[in-house]
Amino acid sequence: MPRLSRVLLRDEALAAIRASIVRGDLAPGQVIKDAELASTLGLSVAPVRSALSRLVDEGLVESKPQSHTRVTPVRPKDVRDAVVVVRAMHEIAAREAASRLTDDDLATMRDANQRFADAVSTGDVDAALSADDELHGVLLARCENAAVRATVERFTPLIRRLERQRFGAPHGQDSIALHEALVDTCRTEPELAVAVTTTIWSTLLEELDETVEATAPDETRTPPAPEEPA
């Protein structure tokens, strides 16, 4: 991670640590020592501890008193729960924003989708995520609902590690056509735009369900009870 100036506040530390977790620089399950992390970032320990506390709330870090602080392992069930909530918020945004979209808004969304397509084709996951955020961000802004935006901001980081894998894989191409359909229907057919939004996030849910199904035997199995002495 890049070193940060000491004049930056907790929010900058939060953004840097969150990004490192999402990118995998701080790997799932990796133990975090706040003093070492602060040194790496060029900060005092206080803003780093504050940032880590926020990341605990977001589900990206877990902390056990007198034990350890570590990057939360990727648990498909937890990610799935977050996707369900985020999907609902984006459905609200699509429905509420439809009547408020301008020609410039639609042009911004189309441009974002073109950059998304270019990024997916070259395997530039960071650029793909940025373009995807910009496209959906138009609807989030135009829906004028602070609670919707806050909820999306709260739960999206938990989903992002999975999205990085998805946009780096060939089936990331599927999102391009869905984005086009979303832009085409937003202003003229709001309910169809909501349905397209549902499809976008449900596709991610389907992939998660497959992952949960594949990992459930290991993650949910109850350990066998110890044998009684003979």
Image (cartoon, rainbow, N blue to C red):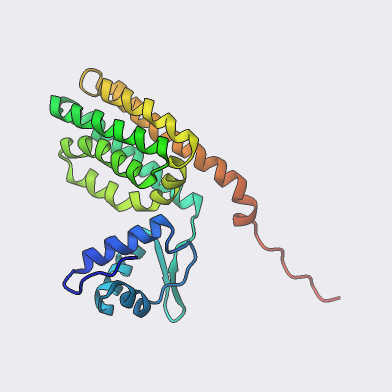
Residue 188 image offset from top left, x and y in percent: 22, 17
> Between 72 and 178, which is closer to the camera in this rendering?
178
Q: Is residue 100 visible?
A: no
Hey, which residue is sitting farthest front in the picture?
122
Residue 229 image offset from top left, x and y in percent: 82, 76
Position of residue 165 relative to residue 8, above or below, is: above
Q: Is residue 2 shown left or right of residue 79?
A: left
Position of residue 2 relative to residue 44, above or below, is: above
Hey, which residue is sitting farthest top in the picture?
188
> Between 128 and 196, which is closer to the camera in this rendering?
128
Hey, which residue is sitting farthest right in the picture?
230
Q: How many marks?
A: 0
Where, by quadrant of the figure, is residue 57 drawn?
bottom left
> Between 127 and 35, which is closer to the camera in this rendering?
127
Where, by quadrant of the figure, is residue 144 drawn?
top left
The quadrant of the rendering that contains the C terminus is bottom right
The quadrant of the rendering that contains the N terminus is bottom left
Residue 172 image offset from top left, x and y in percent: 44, 35
For the point 31% across and 39% down, the residue is 132
For the point 36% across and 65% down, the residue is 56
Q: Is residue 173 visible?
A: yes
For the point 41% across and 35% down, the residue is 121
Position of residue 136 relative to residue 181, above or below, is: below
Residue 64 image offset from top left, x and y in percent: 44, 74
For the point 20% across and 22% down, the residue is 187
